[in-house]
Amino acid sequence: MAKVFAVSVSENKGEQKENVEQVTLQEDHGIVGDAHADDWHRQVSLLAKESIQKMKEQGLDVSAGDFAENLTTEGIDLLELEIGARFKVGPEVVLELTQIGKECHDRCAIYYQAGDCVMPREGVFAKVIEGGQIKPGDAIEVIGSDD
């Protein structure tokens, strides 16, 4: 079963995020209290625990939130999803995939803290279609697309 491994927030963009017990997502905004919440297409960032594990196997001392991801997932291949895919997270939240990977113009603080940044290669971004709360252990289920 695909699930949420960790939920993380930060006050500023471009920094590692702090793991928290749960987050509240607001429709068309993102995670309440997170630096990336706004009326844009990258409201929530997701990275697979499996991607973080690859970095650990390269000798990096990293964990959930270190790559500035809001949701660390487990058991779902995020890179197999297509733009527009919708997925339910927990009992209420619906997210829509808006971007796969990102271009990094400079090496960010995360790169210097962690020694590498997997987010540009394997991170995905989504907007909030239906808000609610998410916590570690919540199920993730692909439910279709926006068309």
Image (spheres, grey):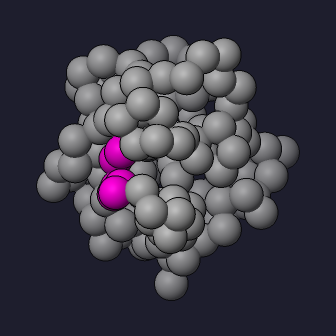
Q: Is residue 107 left or right of residue 77?
A: left
Rendering quarter of residue 3? bottom left
Instruction: Indicate left or right for 136 with 4 as reference.
Output: left
Image quarter in which the C terminus is found: top right
Q: Residue at x 36, y 66 (%)?
A: 5
Question: Which quarter of the picture shows residue 139?
Answer: bottom left
Q: Is residue 35 visible?
A: yes
Q: Residue at x 71, y 26 (%)?
A: 103
In front here: 106 or 2? 106
Number of marks present in the image shown: 0
Out of 66 and 74, give the one closest to the viewer. Answer: 66
Vertical arrangement, residue 109 with respect to residue 64, above or below: above
- Residue 129 seen from this side: no
The residue furthest bottom is 1
Q: Position of residue 10 (x, y in %)?
A: 27, 29
Name the dominant secondary structure of the magenta segment. Answer: loop
The stretch of residues the image draws in magenta is 61-66
Instruction: Look at the picture and state if 51 lies above or below 85.
Output: below
Residue 103 shown in magenta: no
Task: Give residue 56's position: percent from left, percent from top.
Answer: 45, 65
Q: Does residue 126 appear to the left or right of 136 in the view shown?
A: right
Give the quadrant of residue 129.
Answer: top right
Residue farthest along the front direction in this orientation: 59
Point 24% across, 21% down: residue: 11
Q: Give the residue at the far left of this rendering.
A: 21
Residue 90 percent across, percent down from the top left: 38, 64
Q: Is residue 65 located in the magenta-colored stretch of the structure?
A: yes
Residue 95 rendering spot, x and y as whole percentages: 55, 46
64 left or right of 108 in image = left
At x 28%, y 65%, the residue is 136
